[in-house]
Image: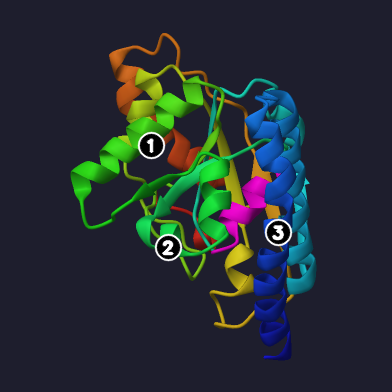
Amino acid sequence: MIRTIIFALVFWVTLILLSVFFIPLGFLNLFKLKKSEEKFLIWMTAAWSKFMFFVAGQKFEFEGMEKIPEHNRICFVANHQSYGDIPMVMGFMGKRVGFIAKKELNRVPILNFWIRAIHCIFIDRGQGRQALRAIETGMEQITMGYPKVLFPEGTRAKNGKMKKFKAGGLQMAVRYDITIVPITINGLFRCFEETGRVTANTTKITIHNPIETVGMDREERKALTGKIEQIISSALPEEFRLAE
């Protein structure tokens, strides 16, 4: 419980302190120094994420980091175990990765500015059509060089057991010829979701071979969701894998 309280305090204090960094960020944006802005955002996001995981006592073991493409026409696709999944991708993938955020986060001071800066998309989860349009907007942004992370399960698997993937976002990735990078997250639910308290833990992250969607035929598109499900599931312990 003490770790949880300390984590909560540090989270809000560091979030407030981050507002200081928006000054140089605004300067870079004003003078259209795109490359410098990109590097600054990647550094700031990664530093904050890694520090918060340090406070939480969360360690990571990575496999396959060399498989991440150098270009930014990427959609990272992962299973969803924890609140920490998004900070993990933002902090360790070496890119300015945006995500689909619930609209309520747009009302959180400081955090909302940061979320917009990394090109996240706000959605109303109660509006199905709007959610699909938001995903499509995200895919359009990927083609402009702003990578995204997608969690096709839709909700967190709080017990670590992987759920079936929804096909919508993955099919849109094919339509926009986007490179899909599957990621398996194994164990991050133990950091908070398992007990409801911040708990020290080690998580295994596996980056799989990228999947190029350019030139996929109809049958390959139809099989894509199931293919990615099985790739991601294969790196989980047997009790957490998706049933075949």
**What range of the chain is rendered magenta?**
83-93
Indicate which disc residue 56 carries. Answer: none
Determine which residue is flagged by label 1: 226
Determine which residue is flagged by label 3: 18
* Front-lying residue, 205 or 76: 76
Specify the amino acid type for callout 1.
Answer: Gly
Mark 2: secondary structure: helix
Residue 234 position (above or below residue 106): above
* CB atoms of marks 2 and 1 within 8 Å: no
Specify the amino acid type for callout 2.
Answer: Arg
How far apart are the two marked residues, 2 and 1, measured between alpha carbons? 36 Å
Chosen colour scheme: rainbow
* CB atoms of marks 2 and 3 within 8 Å: no
* CB atoms of marks 3 and 1 within 8 Å: no
Residue 214 falls in which quadrant of the image?
top left
Q: Where is residue 29 in the image (x, y as percent from the top left)?
A: 64, 33
Determine which residue is flagged by label 2: 107
- Residue drawn where x is 54% and y is 64% of the image: 83
How far apart are the two marked residues, 3 and 1, measured between alpha carbons? 40 Å
Q: Position of residue 142 (x, y in %)?
A: 49, 26
Quadrant, the N terminus: bottom right
Q: Position of residue 167 (x, y in %)?
A: 31, 38
Mark 1: secondary structure: helix
- Residue drawn where x is 73% and y is 83% of the image: 6
Mark 3: secondary structure: helix
* Front-lying residue, 98 or 233: 98
- Residue drawn where x is 35% and y is 19% of the image: 175
85 part of magenta stretch: yes
Specify the amino acid type for callout 3.
Answer: Leu
94 part of magenta stretch: no
Q: Earlier in the sequence, mark 2 or mark 1?
A: 2
